[in-house]
Image (cartoon, rainbow, N blue to C red):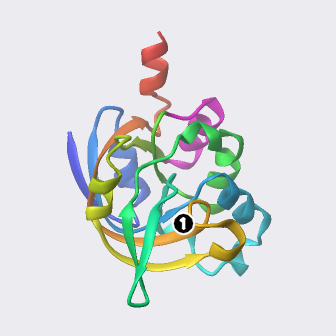
């Protein structure tokens, strides 16, 4: 099935998704790789300058450029998600993030957290960073750029019809990666 959702996405809509479904999202997403996950998990949720639960999480270290004082996305391909397996269950628990975008899959701990908190992990095609950049309507802001550097900073993007995202792990305990391993 194919779905077109606005972010934030309700738990009821997330629960309708099953592995193999394709979704396109419109709204706000934020990037976070290893260092950003650490930074966010160390901070008090109420002291953050943005609310991760209102956005989708994108495992991405974008290539950015600044033109006339405004940030523009050059490329925003997904990064390998398995690196975030160490943090992701705690991240989902703490922030209530229910849509994760990445590539390569996640493990058992993340799968259990997605099930417990009604979330999905979606896969975006690696090597399609320029295509992803075309779906970014605006770069709203960036956090921790000086401290973490461009790929590790948290970027907030406003996206339109971002996808296709393939549901690879659903809230029902199913995983494309488990199926492939079988």
Q: Residue at x 28, y 59 (%)?
A: 5
Q: Nearer the viewer, residue 49 or 97?
A: 49
Residue 57 in percent (x, y) is at 50, 58
Predominant SS of the magenta segment: helix
Residue 181 horizontal/vertical position (percent):
49, 13
Q: Nearer the viewer, residue 16 or 124?
A: 124
Circle 1 SS class? helix
Residue located at (55% from left, 41% from top):
81
Picture quadrant of residue 127: top left
Is 75 situated left or right of 137 in this image?
right
Query: Which residues fall within the magenta stretch?
Result: 105-119
Residue where numbered disc 1 is placed: 53
Residue furthest left as drawn: 2
Q: From the top left corner, tell me how far across and down residue 136 is, in percent.
A: 32, 68
Residue 107: within the magenta? yes
Give the crowd class for mark 1: few <14, some 14-19, many >=20 residues within 10 Å. some
Above or below: residue 69 compared with residue 5? below
Q: Residue at x 72, y 72 (%)?
A: 147
Q: Which quadrant would the N terminus be assigned to in this image?
A: top left
Judged left or right of residue 26, residue 61 is right
Residue at the outermost top position: 182
State the residue lying farthest toward the bottom: 68
Q: In which quadrant of the rendered view does residue 47 lie?
A: bottom right
Please tell me whether residue 105 is drawn above or below residue 44 in the rendered image.
above
**Residue at x-position 54% and y-position 43%:** 114
């Amino acid at each position: 099935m194919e779905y077109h959702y606005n972010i934030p996405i309700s738990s009821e809509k997330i629960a309708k998704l099953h592995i193999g479904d394709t979704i396109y999202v419109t709204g706000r997403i934020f990037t976070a790789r290893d260092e950003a996950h650490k930074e966010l998990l160390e901070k008090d949720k109420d002291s953050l300058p943005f609310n991760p639960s209102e956005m989708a999480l994108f495992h991405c270290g974008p290539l950015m450029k600044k033109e006339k004082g405004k940030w523009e996305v050059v490329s925003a391909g997904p990064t390998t998600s398995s690196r975030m397996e160490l943090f992701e269950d705690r991240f989902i628990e703490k922030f209530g993030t229910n849509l994760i975008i990445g590539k390569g899959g996640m493990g058992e701990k993340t799968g259990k957290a997605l099930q417990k908190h009604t979330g999905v992990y979606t896969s975006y095609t690696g090597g399609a960073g320029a295509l992803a950049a075309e779906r970014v309507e605006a770069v709203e802001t960036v956090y921790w750029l000086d401290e973490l550097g461009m790929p590790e900073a948290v970027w907030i993007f406003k996206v339109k019809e971002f996808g296709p995202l393939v549901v690879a792990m659903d809230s029902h305990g199913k995983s494309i990666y488990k199926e492939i391993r079988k």
